[in-house]
Image: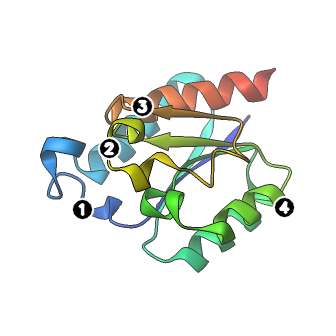
């Protein structure tokens, strides 16, 4: 059975409250339920996690190498600033799929650059919270080969 970690970065705990015109009205609990249902349908084990702290995300990525077969990562604003997260992904053999709720390429200039993209197996962005379900499915397909 495949094991997938869905890892969320800063401010994603505020989904449903923060900029609903950009991120929608679904809460992080709603997203977790969506991911769990997708995982159940695929027959995979799933862990869902969120942290506002860069070091905790780095620790989770490093631990993923021994604990998970794949990672779906919405690094939030750290996507555009964190060389440490990029380095953590590059240092592990576990595949990481980059995910964004909004289309980062249609937003502010600083959001158009992603440090994660250079080390991720791919990116899903701009599809709202439904992108999470697609990302779990995409990671499953990647792992199945």
In the image, taking residue 66 as reference, residue 89 lies left or right, namely left
Name the residue carrying label 2: 107
In the picture of the structure, the residue carrying the numbered disc 4 is 91
Mark 4 element type:
helix
Q: Position of residue 44 (x, y in %)?
A: 63, 34
Q: Secondary structure at mark 2?
A: loop
Q: Residue at label 3?
A: 131
Residue 43 shows up from this direction: no
The answer to whether residue 28 is above or below residue 26 is: below
Residue under the image location 69 percent in, 60 percent down:
86
Q: CA distance from mark 2 to mark 4?
A: 29 Å
Q: Earlier in the sequence, mark 3 or mark 4?
A: 4
Nearer-N-terminus badge (3/1): 1
> How crowded is the residue under tag 4: few (<14 C-alpha within 10 Å), some, or many (20+)?
few
N-term mark: 3 or 2: 2
Q: Residue at x 16, y 53 (%)?
A: 19
Real-space CA distance between mark 1 and mark 2, rounded to the nearest whole angstrom: 19 Å
Q: For the residue labelled by badge 3, is the local secondary structure a helix, a strand or a loop?
A: helix
- Tell me the residue that label 1 is attached to: 14
Q: Residues within 10 Å of mark 1 (few under 14, many from 20)?
A: some
Q: Is residue 101 visible?
A: yes
């Amino acid at each position: 059975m495949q094991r997938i970690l869905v890892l969320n970065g800063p401010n994603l705990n505020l989904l449903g409250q923060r900029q609903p015109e950009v991120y929608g009205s679904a809460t992080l609990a709603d997203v977790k339920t969506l991911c769990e249902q997708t995982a159940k349908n695929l027959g995979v084990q799933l862990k869902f996690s969120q942290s506002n702290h860069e070091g905790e995300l780095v620790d989770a990525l490093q631990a993923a190498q021994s604990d998970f077969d794949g990672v779906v990562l919405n690094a939030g604003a750290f996507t555009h600033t964190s060389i440490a997260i990029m380095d953590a992904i590059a240092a592990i053999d576990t595949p990481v799929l980059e995910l964004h709720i909004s289309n980062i390429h249609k937003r502010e200039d600083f959001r158009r650059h992603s440090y994660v993209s250079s080390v991720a197996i791919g990116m899903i962005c701009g599809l709202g919270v439904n992108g999470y379900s697609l990302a779990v499915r995409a990671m499953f397909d990647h792992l199945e080969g």
